[in-house]
Image (cartoon, helix red, strand yellow):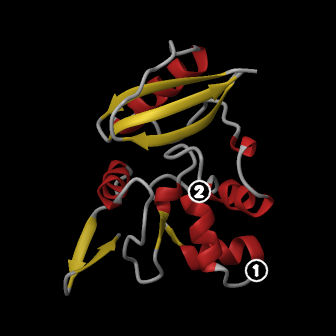
Amino acid sequence: MTSTVYYHKFDIGWLRIESLDDAIIRIDYADDPETSDKPDKVIKQCISELNEYFSGERETFGVKIKPETHGTPFQKSVWKELRQIPYGETISYKVLAERISGSNYSRAVANANGKNPISIIIPCHRVIASNNTLGGYTGGLDKKKLLLSVEGRQPCYINEIQLYY
């Protein structure tokens, strides 16, 4: 089994997309593209769906993904729960931790969130801090802001603290 790696530039910047067999196994941010393989059928589908997402025409993704090729059992449980957050909505790390473990493991959840292998499609950008500020994002807060704005989440500033409604 050989994976295919392809770099594509979207409105958000360069993404590195990796497939294995008939599924996407990784999407992450890249500063500059490296040498790409020829995109296979699943990568072409992924690019098409991401373009539709960025243009506001897609809220859910149909491309097959396999995040289970990476991560610990706990990380996989976080990534599975992330997929339950509806388009255009956000939850806090604390709420996400309570959904998974029934108690407050916010730091562990935030760490697993940051290890998400399939950015955007597994919507780790929809998780924010308990005080409604952005928290962190592996791709950078500018990219998190863009993704939230694509989904209709508009920022509001109160006493220089950024909130999302």
Left or right, 51 with reference to 59? left
- The residue at 36%/57% (across/down) is 140
Amino acid marked by disc 1: Gly
Left or right, 135 with reference to 31? right
> In terms of image quadrants, where is residue 115?
bottom right
The first of marks 1 and 2 along the sequence is 1
Q: Position of residue 109 (x, y in %)?
A: 63, 70
Mark 1 burial class by Cα count in 10 Å: few <14, some 14-19, many 20+: few
Image quadrant where one finds the C terminus: bottom left
Q: Where is residue 47 in the image (x, y as percent from the top left)?
A: 46, 25
What residue is shown with label 2?
Answer: 115
Q: Where is residue 164 in the image (x, y as percent from the top left)?
A: 34, 70
Assign a secondary structure to mark 1: loop
Residue with the most extreme right position: 73
Labels 1, 2: front one: 2
- The residue at 43%/27% (across/down) is 7
Left or right, 67 with reference to 132? right
Amino acid marked by disc 2: Lys
**Nearer to me, 53 or 22:** 22
Query: Relative to residue 42, is residue 52 depicted above or below?
Result: below
What residue is shown with label 1?
Answer: 102
In three-dimensional space, the C-alpha distance between marks 1 and 2, rounded to whole angstroms, equals 21 Å
**Nearer to me, 1 or 84:** 1
Residue with the most extreme bottom position: 159
Mark 2 burial class by Cα count in 10 Å: few <14, some 14-19, many 20+: some
Q: Can residue 56 be seen in this view?
A: no
Q: Where is residue 97 in the image (x, y as percent from the top left)?
A: 66, 75
Query: Relative to residue 54, is residue 135 depicted above or below?
Result: below
